[in-house]
Image (tube, rainbow, N blue to C red):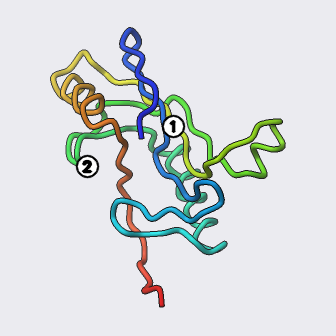
Amino acid sequence: QILKVDEEQGRVYGWAYVLTKNGEQVTDHSGDVIDTPEARHAFEEAVIDYVKDHRTGDVDHESFDVSELIEAAFITKEKAELMGLSTEKEGLWVGYQFNRDTPAGQEAWSLAKQRGAFSIVGTGRREAVA
């Protein structure tokens, strides 16, 4: 969910993925949940890998390098408390700056504002929940 749009700088900020809200497990748009310590750890490690090695945004997982990650925090209640903050959500907070100098970057910028949400591309292993 994009919560802030900076028109002048071409930047958007918001939640890329929410694990919990008010202590309750969140089911994502694909119907998936990250609900075990092992799954949370694997997701956090995937986020770290993305931040270290990739950092680019795309349009519909096809037009790549249209934006760049400029801010990322994997927020947990524990981390928030250590910072002297409180949070109703746990998950991945991000900020992206769009390259509006190219047609693909302009398209991505328009779509991001229109859709108001982020989409994470990746692979994983689904397990049925009983």
Looking at the rendered structure, the number of numbered marks drawn on it comes to 2
Q: Residues within 10 Å of mark 2 (few under 14, many from 20)?
A: few
Q: Residues within 10 Å of mark 1 (few under 14, many from 20)?
A: many
Occupied quadrant, residue 6: top left
Q: For numbered disc 2, what is the local secondary structure?
A: loop
Location of residue 103 with respect to 93 vertically, above or below: above
Residue beneath the point at 48% across and 36% down: 14
Question: To which residue does mark 1 refer?
Answer: 94
Labels 1 and 2 touching (C-beta < 8 A): no
Residue beneath the point at 61% across and 49% down: 89
Location of residue 71 with respect to 40 vertically, above or below: above
Horizontal side of 3 relative to 84 (left or right) equals left
Q: Nearer the viewer, residue 26 or 111?
A: 26
Residue beneath the point at 33% across and 65% down: 30
Residue beneath the point at 48% across and 51% down: 17
Q: For numbered disc 1, what is the local secondary structure?
A: strand
**Where is residue 7 shown, x and y percent of the image?**
36, 13
Q: Nearer the viewer, residue 58 or 23?
A: 23
Q: Earlier in the sequence, mark 1 or mark 2?
A: 2
Horizontal side of 78 relative to 40 (left or right) equals right
Occupied quadrant, residue 28: bottom left
Question: To which residue does mark 2 refer?
Answer: 61
Say which amino acid is labelled 2. His
**Where is residue 82 shown, x and y percent of the image?**
84, 43
**Cα distance in 3D space between marks 1 and 2:** 17 Å
User: Which residue is at the far bottom?
Assistant: 130
**Where is residue 60 shown, x and y percent of the image?**
22, 46
Name the quadrant of the N terminus. top left
Say which amino acid is labelled 1. Val
